[in-house]
Every structure is written in structure tokens, then in C-alpha cells.
């Protein structure tokens, strides 16, 4: 029986992961996942695409919403969660073409960011209902945090094993320094949910899946970018893998793909922001399948 073997969240978009044994699920994703991000002077999000070193910033969220950021040199700062309710300043921000408002962190936090990351601003999505999911893949009213596009990203160890086999078997594969004999870790793909016990690429045919007490719709494969070539432990770019091999062996919707984007379904009778709880070891059951996604564009 497939089971949930990994749970990960990223309190600040593009920073280092947290890997709890359990996590609450909200309509817009795991509780606390990507509710903060950095933006440039235009309000556009900043990620490891532009700043690989962002992955070295550690985060520690508190129950009252306060966020502690820690740099590799050990220096840190505590950031109270700003919000419109507290009359904090709202900024117009943007993630992949979608504009919405987020609350700006205090001056102390901004000074710390300028010193340890760059000329960016730290913002908090105090109300995730402000940002809708792409209507081409979502139902009316569904929203998302400051993740790239969807509430959750699921990957499987079966697909990672197969990907590593393909890389190892290809004489033309060019790994980065020190990577020649090392299989790629799942951390390269920055998933929320990792499932073990399936065949390689099985998730490409999933349409609805139950994990523990909750159900999810698999709405779109995840097209991958340069972040997957970044070592999440030291922030270094490590060559062309896995993008080269994914582009050659696993193209979906014209993109090198790995993983599926999920939207949680609200259980009958459940109201409020918490839909349920996921726990490591939860059983995974495929409820509905769909034809594999095409390599070319969707019809």
C-alpha cells in the first residue's frame, strides 16, 4: 500500500524546508506553507531562480504567527506577522502574473533582509483568499498561498528512483562537481508531500487521491526549472541535472516535469480553515485516474 513518507513546508517562499511528522491542511495548502516571500522593487516575487542562497535561510514559525529567520552565519531576527487587521502597510505583489496584496514586515525585518539577502522586501499573505488559483485548473473560490501556482505539490519516490536510473545510465549526462556518483535527493524538487510504494510516474495518471483522512484533486503536472539544479544544502548550482534528463524522458505539457500539483477537497461537514491533518505513514489510495498528460500542449 502506498503511504505518505515525506511532509515538507517552506514558511518563506524559496527558503529551507521544515519537515514535520504531521501538518494541518488548509484550503490553500499546508498550514504555514509559503505565507511569506521576498519581493523586488516592482513587487514581483523573488525565488532561488534569482537568489540560490535563499535556500540557506532557516525559518522557525511560532503559534502566534511570529517568524524567526536565521542566516548561515547564525544571526537572526524575529518578525511579527503583519496584517491588514493591524493596519500594517499592504503592498501590491505578483507571483507569475497574478497580482494581489500582502502585508509588509516591519523595518527591523527589512533591514535584516537587506543585510543578509539583498535589496528586497519581506511580505506576509495575511489573507490567502486574496490570491485565486489559475481558473483553468481550479473551481470558483479556490485560492493558494504564495506557492508558484497550486496549494500542494506531490512527488513519489518511485519516480525519483527511475529518474536517477535514467541519469546514471546516460553516458551524455553531465552532473555538477562532486555529483557524479550521487543520486539526486528529493529535496531538489521542494515537494510538500512525498509518497512511497508506487510505480515510477504513476502519479501522472492520478485524478483524485485520498491521503489519510483527506482527498485531493491532481490538477496539473509540475513543470520544472533551474531550482532543481540547486543543492538545497549549500545553495550551489550543480550542473544540468535533472532538467536535462527530464526534458529527454519525461516531458508533459511541453515542459520537463516532475510531480503533480494538488488542490485539497473540503470534507463533508467540515467548516473553517482547517480541513484535516496529514501524518507521516498515512495510507494513500487512488480514487480516480485520468489518461496520462500529453507531452505536447493540452487540448
Image: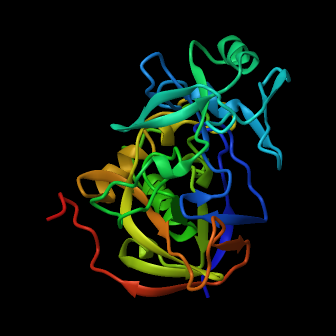
Of 111 and 287, nearer the camera is 111
Question: Which residue lies at the image location 69% right of the left edge and 72% below the top edge?
Answer: 278
Of 92 and 150, nearer the camera is 92
Residue 214 placement, left or right of 129: right
Res 236 visible: no
Q: What's the image's color scheme? A: rainbow
Above/below status of 274 relative to 15: below
Number of callouts: 0
Residue 288 placement, left or right of 2: left
Question: Which residue lies at the image location 54% right of the left edge and 76% below the top edge?
Answer: 266
Above/below status of 216 relative to 132: below
Q: Where in the figure is residue 171, as x and y percent of width and height?
A: 39, 47
Q: Where in the figure is residue 26, as x and y percent of width and height?
A: 61, 63
Of 215 and 250, nearer the camera is 215
Res 170 visible: yes
Of 243 and 138, nearer the camera is 138
> Residue extending furthest right?
74
Question: Which residue lies at the image location 70% right of the left edge and 72% below the top edge?
Answer: 277
Amino acid at each position: 500500500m502506498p503511504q505518505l513518507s515525506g511532509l515538507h513546508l517552506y514558511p518563506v517562499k524559496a527558503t529551507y524546508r521544515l519537515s514535520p511528522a504531521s501538518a494541518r491542511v488548509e484550503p490553500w495548502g499546508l498550514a504555514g506553507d509559503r505565507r511569506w516571500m521576498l519581493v523586488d522593487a516592482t513587487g514581483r516575487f523573488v525565488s532561488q531562480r534569482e537568489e540560490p542562497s535563499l535556500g540557506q535561510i532557516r525559518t522557525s514559525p511560532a503559534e502566534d504567527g511570529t517568524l524567526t529567520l536565521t542566516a548561515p552565519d547564525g544571526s537572526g531576527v524575529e518578525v511579527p506577522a503583519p496584517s491588514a487587521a493591524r493596519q500594517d502597510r499592504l503592498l501590491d505583489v505578483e507571483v507569475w502574473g497574478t497580482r494581489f496584496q500582502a502585508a509588509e514586515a516591519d523595518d527591523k525585518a527589512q533591514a535584516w533582509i537587506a543585510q543578509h539577502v539583498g535589496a528586497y522586501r519581506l511580505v506576509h499573505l495575511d489573507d490567502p483568499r486574496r490570491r485565486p488559483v489559475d481558473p483553468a485548473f481550479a473551481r470558483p473560490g479556490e485560492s493558494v498561498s504564495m506557492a508558484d501556482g497550486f496549494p500542494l505539490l506531490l512527488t513519489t519516490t518511485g519516480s525519483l528512483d527511475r529518474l536517477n536510473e535514467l541519469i546514471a545510465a546516460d553516458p551524455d549526462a553531465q552532473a555538477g562537481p562532486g555529483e557524479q556518483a550521487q543520486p539526486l535527493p528529493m529535496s531538489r524538487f521542494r515537494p510538500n508531500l512525498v509518497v512511497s510504494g508506487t510505480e515510477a510516474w504513476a502519479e501522472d495518471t492520478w485524478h483524485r487521491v485520498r491521503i489519510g483522512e483527506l482527498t485531493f484533486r491532481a490538477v496539473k503536472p509540475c513543470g520544472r526549472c533551474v531550482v532543481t539544479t540547486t543543492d538545497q544544502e549549500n545553495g550551489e548550482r550543480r550542473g544540468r541535472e535533472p532538467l536535462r534528463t527530464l526534458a529527454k524522458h519525461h516531458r508533459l505539457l511541453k515542459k520537463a516535469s516532475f510531480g503533480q500539483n494538488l488542490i485539497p477537497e473540503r470534507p463533508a461537514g467540515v467548516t473553517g480553515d482547517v480541513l484535516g491533518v496529514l501524518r507521516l505513514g498515512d495510507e494513500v489510495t487512488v480514487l480516480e485516474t485520468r489518461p496520462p498528460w500529453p507531452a505536447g500542449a493540452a487540448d
